[in-house]
Amino acid sequence: MNDVFSAKQAELVSILKHGKLRRINLLEGSVRSGKTWISLLVWALWVGTMPADASYLMVAKTLTSLRRNCLDLLQSLVGTKNFKYNLNKKEGRLFGRLVYLEGVNDARAESKIRGMTLQGAYCDELTLFSEDFFSMLLSRLSLPGAKLFATTNPDNPQHWLMEKYIKRSDELDMLVQRYTIDDNPFLDPAYVASLKKEYTGVFYDRFIRGLWCVAEGLIFDMYDDSSPAQVKADPGPFAWYFAACDYGTQNPCTFGLYGVRGDGSSRTMHLIREYYYDGRKAQRQKTDGEYAQDFKTFIGETSIRCVVVDPSAASFIAQLRKDGWTVRPAKNDVLDGIRLMAQMIAAGRFTIDPGCQYTRQERLTYAWDPKATERGEDKPLKENDHTCDRDRYACQYAFGRQAISFD
């Protein structure tokens, strides 16, 4: 068995084999630890032994993340003959059993499952769910022998999942298995070593060590303003160029021009120059048209692939498109974006020009909100964040999921 499974994975398979699964079965810990792979395998094997006329549910933050993290992997594990799904219909068939598919990333999430009667449920990245949704889901698991399977990375130790479930697992009918990256013997040691270097601070503690710890202090504590590996002149040429924008009316507006080289895990990005205008300090707010003209001047003769813009800046996006620019609304998932940006900075894959003074200043002061931390939430302070938001949009466009190491 050890040729196929890690010791932790073999332990879970043994629990399944001997009928020792609990009502709630949670696998938590670091990235790349093998917890998602084994949880999906055990989920599939368990579903295959349960009543064929019952209903089941698989859920993640979004349907897109459910497909990316779970559905395609599950299909590769059991084969397309045994698992087919239709994301538009939001359902699949696993060993002939009906499996509903849902995302929970909106205010209507709880109402989506109200009224369901379920035999089993699978939850991906459980800390991203609301407590109300999870409570409702548990109430829907009302058939005899019903079970819930879930995976998650660690979060704030005040998070509802830790406080109300993990700490009380001995009181509840709940199995908690903790995984670390070192529990996965199938990873290339050089890859593990590189990954450990790419994470620092709270991200290292949570996603490498698998610890539940608070996010406090500076967000980009891995940023060294004096390091030539992070702040350097790079005249190019680059394989391709693009721009990003964090737009503000009362708040500052900032543009960045980026050059990109390479692909996959070798891709790098460089901030070539910046634009920053603070209407409050200047005591004059610019119009969309004026900002669009400034953007044209800022880009100059550089041929850019597109401009990535804060999706809430609808009027400015319309103005840029009217002027003939290709615009892509930015992905605005703050925490994923911060983690990705931190990883790229630490790995030396995102560098900036020494002349980008506003960017350098904000990186040195961008901090976690201590009041949010006390509430068990991870949120940055809404100050000194404009170039950081812009760079976060740029990282999510240039690197995307290919740079984040999940199970």
Image (cartoon, rainbow, N blue to C red):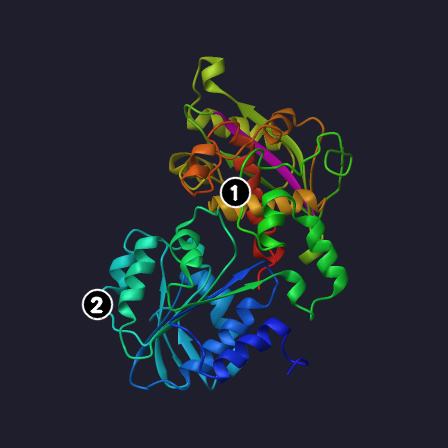
Quadrant of the snapshot with the C terminus: bottom right
Kind of residue at disc 2: Gly
The image position of residue 119, as x and y in percent, is: 32, 77
Q: Nearer the viewer, mark 2 or mark 1?
A: 1
Q: Nearer the viewer, residue 146 or 124?
A: 146
Q: Which residues are magenta?
A: 252-260
Q: Which residue sits furthest top?
A: 283
Q: Write down the residue under mark 2.
A: 115
On screen, residue 25 above or below 195 = below
Three-letter residue code for mark 1 = Val
Q: Relative to the observer, which residue lies in front, 384 or 256?
A: 384
Mark 2: give few (<14), some (14-19) or many (20+) Cα within 10 Å: few
Total marks placed: 2
Residue 251 covered by magenta stretch: no
Category of crowding for the residue at label 1, using alpha-carbon neighbours closer than 10 angstroms: few (below 14), some (14–19), many (at least 20): many
Residue 308 position within the rendered picture, expressed as x and y whole percent measured from the top left: 52, 42
Going 31% across and 65% down the picture, which residue do you hit?
138
Task: Tell me, yes or no, whether the highlighted magenta stretch contains residue 253.
Answer: yes
**Main secondary structure found in the magenta portion:** strand
Q: Which residue is mark 1?
A: 214
